[in-house]
Image (cartoon, rainbow, N blue to C red):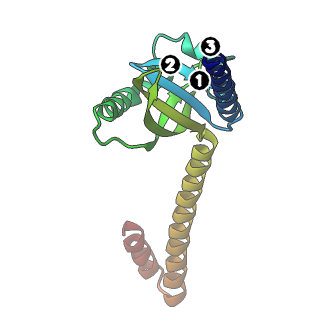
């Protein structure tokens, strides 16, 4: 009788585990964000969105990489290695940051990362949830350029207004020229 009960209990636990695994897989695979887990720079898990962000056809392609470092822009590598090492030592490290990554085709992209330490198959690992923010960065750069151009235009308009004020208040052309030179020099 106990043997039958133990068998039913094992079957129930297996069914619950399959249900939990299915829910997890649906949650992660249905995410709008890329998710990957790595340990010692080796990708252990990645969802399809993560593969898409980096220009790979499948998560298996990401897992086949020698190192996650291949996905990070060279000028970002030291900083991100320091973050990962500090996090695994239990030290403070940013849990949210932006950095540049590299797609399979070599294109540099901007990423917003949310990072935490997790236990993966019995050992510490790093979970990264990321979003491609390249378009937002381009829009921010365009806005900055537009603001700078507007500032230059405002300064030029102010200089022209001052020239007009000088001209209208003076009848002597030499006086106008002298004031213009002084105004242009400042």
Apparent side of residue 70 relative to residue 142 in the rendered image (left or right)? left
Q: How many numbered markers are drawn?
A: 3
Q: Nearer the viewer, residue 68 or 137?
A: 68
Q: Residue at x 42, y 19 (%)?
A: 41
Q: Secondary structure at mark 1?
A: strand
| Residue under numbered circle 1 | 46
- N-terminal label among 1 and 3: 1
Q: Position of residue 155 (x, y in %)?
A: 50, 68
Q: In terms of image quadrants, where is residue 22? A: top right
Q: Secondary structure at mark 2?
A: strand
Q: Quadrant of the C terminus?
A: bottom left
Q: Quadrant of the N terminus?
A: top right
Q: Position of residue 148 (x, y in %)?
A: 52, 58
Apparent side of residue 73 relative to residue 93 in the rendered image (left or right)? right
Q: Nearer the viewer, residue 172 or 60?
A: 60
Q: Is residue 107 above or below residue 170?
A: above
Q: Is residue 43 above or below residue 154?
A: above
Q: Are marks 2 and 1 in contact (CB under 8 Å)?
A: yes
Q: In terms of image quadrants, where is residue 135? A: top right
Q: Nearer the viewer, residue 177 or 111?
A: 111
Q: Residues within 10 Å of mark 1 (few under 14, many from 20)?
A: many
Apparent side of residue 140 relative to residue 16 in the rendered image (left or right)? left
Q: Secondary structure at mark 3?
A: helix
Q: Residue at x 28, y 32 (%)?
A: 89
Q: Position of residue 120 (x, y in %)?
A: 47, 24
Q: Residue at x 54, y 27 (%)?
A: 36
| Residue under numbered circle 2 | 43
Q: Position of residue 77 (x, y in %)?
A: 38, 26
| Residue under numbered circle 3 | 60
Q: Nearer the viewer, residue 106 or 5?
A: 5
Q: Residue at x 29, y 34 (%)?
A: 86
């Amino acid at each position: 009788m106990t043997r039958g009960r133990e068998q039913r209990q094992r079957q129930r636990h297996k069914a619950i585990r399959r249900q939990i695994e299915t829910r997890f897989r649906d949650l992660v695979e249905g995410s709008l964000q890329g998710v990957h887990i790595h340990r010692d720079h080796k990708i252990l898990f990645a969802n399809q969105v993560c593969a898409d962000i980096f220009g790979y056809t499948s998560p298996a392609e990401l897992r086949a990489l020698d190192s996650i470092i291949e996905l990070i822009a060279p000028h970002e590598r030291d900083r991100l290695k320091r973050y990962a090492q500090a996090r695994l030592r239990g030290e403070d490290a940013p849990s949210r940051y932006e950095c540049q990554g590299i797609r399979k085709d070599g294109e540099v992209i901007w990423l917003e990362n949310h990072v935490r330490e997790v236990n993966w198959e019995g050992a510490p690992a790093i979970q990264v949830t990321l979003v491609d923010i390249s378009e937002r960065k381009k829009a921010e750069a365009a806005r900055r350029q537009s603001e700078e151009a507007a500032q230059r235009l405002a300064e030029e308009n102010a200089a022209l207004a001052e020239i007009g004020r000088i001209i209208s208040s003076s009848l002597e052309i030499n006086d106008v020229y002298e004031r213009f030179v002084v105004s242009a020099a400042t």
